[in-house]
Image (tube, rainbow, N blue to C red):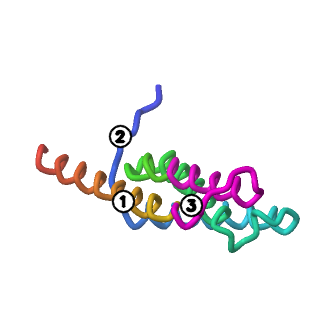
């Protein structure tokens, strides 16, 4: 029988794991970007996809709470950037960044609040 792991807060080890997973994903996507320009290494699409993949990996391994919120946020923002880059939709991409920043901030606030409530109840 497998043991279910509960959610936890960020730790230096979890942040390092997220960074490594994001860097590997970004590198792989950048290699694709050599042949397909929308995924070039410095594009917002590639960076956000890398960060989103890092969040998914971090959630699976460490159950870091904020990754539940930031993974879909990064992946959706990356998809919007990609669709805009390939001219499928027309979006002023500068408007996407405030949503990403506010979403990341809110995710960390939820994690901080959850962990402070969990500490006080134990």
Point out the tag, 2 or 3, that comes first from the N-terminus. 2
Kindly report which numbered mark, 2 or 3, lies closer to the viewer in this rendering: 3
Q: Residues within 10 Å of mark 3 (few under 14, many from 20)?
A: many
Spot the residue most to the top.
1
Q: Quadrant of residue 48?
A: bottom right
* Secondary element at image label 2: loop
Which mark is drawn over residue 48?
none
Which residues lie in the magenta part?
A: 71-95
Q: Secondary structure at mark 3?
A: helix
Identify the residue at horizontal 36%, vertical 59% (top origin).
Answer: 10
N-terminal-most mark, 3 or 1: 1
Identify the secondary structure beneath mark 1.
loop
- For the point 41% across and 34% down, the residue is 4
Q: Quadrant of residue 9?
A: bottom left
The residue that disc 3 covers is 51
Seen at 38% across and 60% down, the residue is: 102
Quickly name the residue at label 1: 10
Q: Which residue is mark 2?
A: 6
Rate crowding at label 1 as few (under 14), some (14 to 19) or many (20 or more) other CA atoms within 10 Å: some
Decide: is 118 above or below 48.
Answer: above
Q: CA distance from mark 2 to mark 3?
A: 22 Å
């Amino acid at each position: 029988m497998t043991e279910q792991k509960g959610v936890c807060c960020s730790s230096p080890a979890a942040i390092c794991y997220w960074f490594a997973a994001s860097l590997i994903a970004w590198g792989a996507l950048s290699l694709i970007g050599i042949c397909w320009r929308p995924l070039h290494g410095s594009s917002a699409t590639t960076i956000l996809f890398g960060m989103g993949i890092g969040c998914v990996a971090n959630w699976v391994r460490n159950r870091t709470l904020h990754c539940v919120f930031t993974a879909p946020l990064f992946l959706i923002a990356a998809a919007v950037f990609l669709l805009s880059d390939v001219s499928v939709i027309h979006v002023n991409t500068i408007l996407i960044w405030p949503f990403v920043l506010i979403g990341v901030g809110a995710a960390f606030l939820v994690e901080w609040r959850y962990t402070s409530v969990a500490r006080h109840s134990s």
